[in-house]
Amino acid sequence: MALGLKESEALWRQNSRELHLAQAVVAGAAADVRVAGQRPNPDVSLNVLSISPWSGFGAGSLKDKKMDSQFRIDQLIERGGKRDLRVKGAESRLDAARFEMDDVARQQIGVLRYAYYNLRLAQQKLMLARDTAVLYAKTVDAGRLRLKAGDIAPVDLSRLQIDSARAESDARQAVTELEQAQVALAYLIGREADARHLVATDDWPMLEEQALDQAPLAERPDLDAARKRLDAAVADRDLAKAKKRRDVTLGFQYERNLQNAPTDSVGFGISVPLFVWHEYEGDIERAEADLNLARLQLEQQQAQVAGQVAQARNALLSARDRYKRFEGGLLADAEKVAGAAELAYSKGAMSLMDLLDARRTQRQIQIEAASARADYAKALSDWQIQAEFRKTK
């Protein structure tokens, strides 16, 4: 299954479990806003009074029984703007959940690109390892012929066989690394069943000299989420203080009395709480502590973001310089040296040990060059994610 980076990102947006979990949190926060805006439901009660087991209940139907009945409705009236404060806090938490979902997307898209570039690197390492194993196998075959002809000593053939076995072992290890990279990418895009068939087809990104333009720190979604959490804590603090404003319960009552002369009557009532044992001091202190905690968390997040951006910048600078060293001639020089060593050895002008050293150096430089390209691709992705999520907000 050949995949470009764009196709991988599209599959990730469809199948990311982490993104779906964040969306579920947003849906729950949206429901909380609706709950916060709902007024208290009234209470309805029906009471039967003055039931006397000695005088009997009286003859006739139920309405003629000698007992009183009351029907009552009570409605709580909130004061102090409690409902508005609840809505304000819930809306701030909803906004925070949305920003946190954006931050999950920001982090997970970075994880996806890392996984994609790891797969690309594993493919290249496997290709290099297989080419090296094939080269050593051919050299061993040639060495056996030269040994029969008396051109090399038995110990030289043994050295070739040892390096050939090592190259085969490296190729097997490269296969394991490739399979691990395929599994990691398959999970992120929801294609676990096709993991062994995933192939990263995009080439490494080219050097971008303008990539280091500073991204504004104030527009990171995790910072926006922390600010909204602070707004919610302010609303919760104000809501706790509003509890000192007494709520009022209004009641309407209809009563039917059948003890003596049947009479019907209506009545009204009002009730308020008595602040005898407390005036919600504990609730207010807790809300103040939560507000201070939200403030500190925002400050902590701002400091962490500044450090993360500085690290991303330094990582990109370092990866770019390393990339340039390899592309600027180091890789080509290693290939030239290895080619010259092969030619010299074939003409008897170089010892076997020098040839093997040249081969090892070339392979090491090739692997380091591939790793440098992967490191630059990852560092560039880390930096570009800042701007990408700034544009989508």
Image: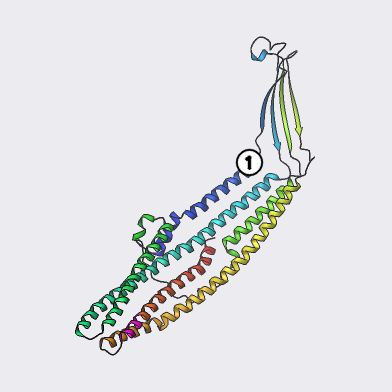
**Residue 342 appears left or right of 333:** left
In the image, farthest residue toward the top: 59
What quarter of the picture does the N terminus occupy? bottom left
x 60%, y 46%: residue: 32
Image position, residue 352 (x, y; %): 30, 84
x 71%, y 45%: residue: 81
Q: Secondary structure at mark 1?
A: loop
Judging depth in this view, the residue of 9 and 128 nearest the camera is 128
Image position, residue 288 (x, y; %): 72, 53
Quarter assignment of residue 243? top right
Residue 189 magenta-drawn?
A: no
In the image, farthest residue toward the left: 149
Quarter assignment of residue 43? top right
Judging depth in this view, the residue of 75 and 360 nearest the camera is 360
x 49%, y 55%: residue: 18
In the image, farthest residue toward the front: 154
x 42%, y 59%: residue: 10
**Residue 30 appears left or right of 58:** left
**Residue 29 appears left or right of 40:** left
Judging depth in this view, the residue of 77 and 306 nearest the camera is 306
- Start-end of magenta stretch: 349-359
* Residue neighbourhood size for the residue with mark 1, other residues' Cα within 10 Å, grouped as few (<14), some (14–19), many (≥20): few
Image position, residue 355 (x, y; %): 32, 84
What quarter of the picture does the C terminus occupy? bottom right
Quarter assignment of residue 188? bottom left
Q: Amino acid at mark 1?
A: Gln
Residue placed under numbered mark 1 in the picture? 38
